[in-house]
Amino acid sequence: MNKQPLLILLLSFIAGILLQEFLVLDRLFVCLILIFSGVSLISIFIKTVFFQKIKYYLLGFFFFSIGLFVHFQNSEQPKLPILKEKETIVFQLNKKLNSNEKNRKYYVEILEVSDLKHKESLPFKTVISIPKAIEALDFEHYYKAEVYIHQPEETKNDFQFDYKKYLARQDVYFQAYLPTDILKTEKNSILFEDKIKQKRLDILNQINHSSLSPRIQEFLKGIILADRTEMDAETVKDFNQTGLVHLLAISGSHMVIIFWIVLSILNQIITVKKRRFSIILSILFIWIFAIFIDFGSSVMRSCLMISCYYIMGLLQRKSDLLHSLALSAFILLIFDSNQLFDVGFQLSYVAVLGIWWLTNPIKNLFRKPRFKAEKVFYEISAMTFAAQIATLPLAIYYFHQFSFVSIIANLLIIPLSEVIIVSSLLIVILIALGFNKIPFLYKAFDVFVEYILKLIHWFSNFESLMTRNISLNIFELSILFLVIYFLKFLIKDFFNPRNLLRFGFCLLTFFVMRISSNLYQYNKEEMLVHGFYKEKIISIKDKDQVVFWMKENKNEDKISDFVINPYLTSRRIKDFKINYIPVDSEAFVYEGKQYDLK
């Protein structure tokens, strides 16, 4: 507690969030725990040996109860309106989402429902799909349209992605589809927040009309303005398969690079005696930038970590990465405890912890650098390896895949990331300022990024190095993190028997648990009904084989991605078969049993 008080209190706070998430305690019980912990905290001031010994436990319990209370408040479902299947609504744009082949998607705020009797539940948010033939939404208008609207369906199986819960964490409880035209009217007054969002939208449109090729336009919008909504599926797939998707999203590395660019420029202008103003102005700049690109979660995390780290220095306190990490996480979670369950949040903080824990031991494996460039290369390589090792269990747990090529791809591309980000930022600034008549510069950027994308695509083609449908449960994940914890000591002193024993015991425990889980799934026999829109898919599992029964469907690729592969992964099966049923069939017979398809 004396060494890392903030981290320990953060872990106590997170424990409270997790307890409320899984047990769903009622308001009275949560309030009683909070009151009891608050009263018990008074005993810290009692100067007796017993209370001085337990004061840290009482402080941890107090933060645990705060986490419990905060998540109760954040996860409490508001009173929802009772809506018909078809409603006429008035709404405004809240956020642009990823598009698909046919529709654009948005979060919108519904301000009025024509036939709604009880208005106290207004306004509320919904995700809405709008055909691409209809004009794109903006922040300068109100819209009126007739839509089909409903609440998301409950997931029926444990292996499926719970889209309803995901939306609820964003305070969204409805889905809507707009099939026809839309009426719009200009807003009499536009909030400052909406003006900023609209300006970002205008720059995105300016990029669309620039001389850059369409593919490079989408890359530019993603890497600087955090907008991947129109990016083609092949590019996204290439980045996912090479483990470079963090380069597409505005992440910690982006904000650190932008912060250092601004700081370096200001240090040339501001005198040495006033260097603290350079730091303050640089922090201010990244927050302005964060506001401009619509406060993405990853951007907020990066800005908070950078701010906490440098503010400690400004306050003449020793800058500590773990203190900065814990403080930034605590600030984020106190305002929105649901962020704890965001995959990006978990990967970001685990990556930083991995860098802190493993970078120096890995760096010491390299020879002593002779040149400055060699030292920089070793630093980047060690940090890359540390972050990848730390996040690997979590990435497999959520995405069920791993590519060995991602290690090489990251080592080659990450050193170039600074050049990519700086040049992309420069191009966006030039486009935003209206400097469109610099063809040679835009052409050079176009060619440079195109070669980068081709290199990433080349890496992604190594299918033999990609392992998919890897199953990992929460217990296996926990043991793997323990393995990574002991890995540091093993790297530092490989021949120490104690280090070898602890590391080996954790690995052995992991394999024993994995074999046990595989045997449990192998012996499981079951028949499940899977829903995919209006279609029914039935799976019949026997030992290590499963047969899927379904009608022929043009969405078979999506059925494979959202039904078949998740099921195979969760049940740890590789051998499967698909049997097709005539479209007009209402039932089928398999091994003497009849199964209804109604």
Image (tube, helix red, strand yellow):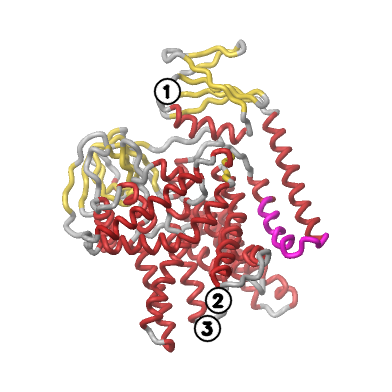
Give the structural element (helix, strand or loop) at label 3: loop
How far apart, in angstroms, are the residues tagged by discs 2 and 3? 9 Å
Residue density around tag 1, few if under 14, some if 14–19, many if 20 or more, within 10 Å: few
Residue 60 visible here = yes
Q: Earlier in the sequence, mark 1 or mark 2?
A: 2
How far apart, in angstroms, are the residues tagged by discs 1 and 3? 65 Å
Relative vertical location of residue 221 with respect to residue 272 in this rendering, above or below: above
Residue 316 tag number: 3
Relative vertical location of residue 277 with respect to residue 100 in this rendering, above or below: below
Question: What range is drawn magenta here?
Answer: 480-497
Residue 319 tag number: 2
Q: Is residue 6 left or right of residue 78?
A: right
Expressed as whole percent of the image width and height from the top left, the position of residue 407 reads 57, 52
Q: Residue furthest right?
A: 497
How far apart, in angstroms, are the residues tagged by discs 1 and 2? 58 Å
Which residue in the structure is indicated by mark 1? 553
Residue density around tag 3, few if under 14, some if 14–19, many if 20 or more, within 10 Å: few
Q: Residue furthest top?
A: 592
Q: Residue furthest bottom?
A: 273
The residue nearer to you, when weighing 264 against 182, is 264
The residue nearer to you, when weighing 507 against 160, is 507
Expressed as whole percent of the image width and height from the top left, the position of residue 192 reads 26, 63
Residue 193 falls in which quadrant of the image? Answer: bottom left
- Look at label 2 and name its amino acid: Ser
Residue 121 visible here = no
Expressed as whole percent of the image width and height from the top left, the position of residue 154 reads 47, 36
Expressed as whole percent of the image width and height from the top left, the position of residue 408 reads 56, 52
- Look at label 3 and name its amino acid: Gln
Q: Earlier in the sequence, mark 1 or mark 3?
A: 3
Q: Are marks 2 and 3 in contact (CB under 8 Å)?
A: no
